[in-house]
Image (spheres, grey):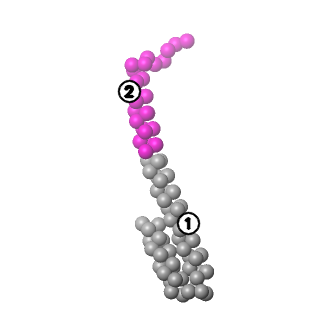
Amino acid sequence: GVQTCALPICTEGINSNVNSFHELTKKSSSEYKENQKKKNSKKKYREKLEEAYKMSTINRTKSDELTYEAAQILKEIEK
């Protein structure tokens, strides 16, 4: 067979691919962390609203506090 690429010639191309991969991995990792944070915040938001609904027949003041906390979480999600 015929060798199509000698190692010293290809090294530069390989290094640029490796660097591109590392940049992509960093980006993907930060995006994953951000998505996880949003997912957890959405879960907390739903839990606060559910608790507020349950409390609405027992303690209206506590229900209002929980609704306010849920609204604060929603603001964080929307940033």
- Give the x, y percent position of residue 25: 46, 43
- Give the x, y percent position of residue 61: 51, 86
Task: Tell me the quarter of the picture where residue 17 sits.
Answer: top left
Q: Is residue 15 magenta?
A: yes
The amino acid at mark 2 is Glu
- Give the x, y percent position of residue 28: 47, 47
Query: Who's the residue at 52% across and 13% down the image?
Result: 2
Mark 1: few/some/many CA within 10 Å (<14, 14-19, 20+) = few
Query: Who's the residue at 48% across and 18% down the image?
Result: 4
Contact, mark 2 vs mark 1 (Cβ under 8 Å): no
Query: Who's the residue at 44% across and 68% down the image?
Result: 76
Q: Which residue carries the number 1 mark? A: 43
- 79 to 56, vertically: above or below: above
The dominant secondary structure in magenta is: helix
Q: State which region is magenta.
A: 1-26
Front residue of this view, candidates 10 and 60: 60
Task: Tell me the quarter of the picture where residue 79 sits.
Answer: bottom left
Front residue of this view, candidates 61 and 46: 61
Give the spatial CA distance, label 2 vs label 1.
Answer: 46 Å
Q: Which residue carries the number 2 mark? A: 12
- 54 to 75, vertically: above or below: below
Q: Is residue 37 magenta?
A: no
Front residue of this view, candidates 1 and 54: 54
Q: Quadrant of the image for the N terminus?
A: top right
- 38 to 45, vertically: above or below: above
